[in-house]
Image (spheres, rainbow, N blue to C red):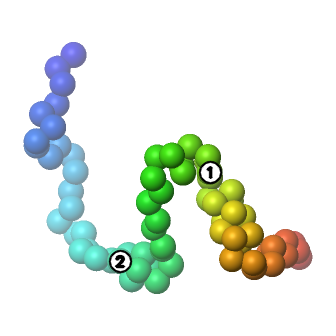
Amino acid sequence: MKRPNKDRMRSEYDFSKGERGRYVGRLIKGANVVVLDSDVAAVYRDSRSVNAALRKLAGLPRPRKRTVR
């Protein structure tokens, strides 16, 4: 099987009607990206455990669970 050239865009992709920056406002408003060092990431495997540790360190109360209506 012939492998496609990674430097070329496939002919079936059509971005002619694309809108640059369409979702950037949503990203800026609601995303906080924090990069963990590898030794810290080995201890805290997911965002829930990182948030729990930071809340405890900051002395914040645990968030209440949302009720489903």
Nearer the observer, 69 or 63: 63
Q: Amino acid at mark 2?
A: Val
Residue 25 at least partly seen: yes
Taking 32 as reference, is 66 left or right?
Answer: right
Q: Is residue 13 left or right of residue 28?
A: left
Q: Residues within 10 Å of mark 2 (few under 14, many from 20)?
A: few
- Residue type highlighted by circle 1: Tyr
SS of the residue under disc 2: helix
Quadrant, the C terminus: bottom right
Q: Which residue is mark 2?
A: 24
**Residue at the spot of label 1:** 44
- Quarter of the rendering containing residue 52: bottom right
Q: Residue at x 42, y 75 (%)?
A: 27
Q: Secondary structure at mark 1?
A: loop
Instruction: Tell me residue 62's x, y (percent).
Output: 81, 73
Q: Quadrant of the N terminus?
A: top left
Q: Between marks 1 and 2, how big is the CA–CA gap?
A: 29 Å
Above-or-below relation of 24 to 16: below
Is the C-beta separation of discs 1 and 2 under 8 Å? Answer: no
Left or right: 53, with 64 as reference point: left
Please state which of residues 24 and 46 is positioned toward the viewer in this rendering.
Answer: 46
Q: Earlier in the sequence, mark 1 or mark 2?
A: 2
So how many labels did they put on this image? Answer: 2
Which residue is at 22% across, 69% downward? 17
Q: Residue furthest top?
A: 1
Q: Position of residue 22 (x, y in %)?
A: 33, 77
> Which is closer to the viewer, label 1 or label 2?
1
Mark 1 neighbour density, 10 Å: few (under 14) some (14–19) many (20 or more): some
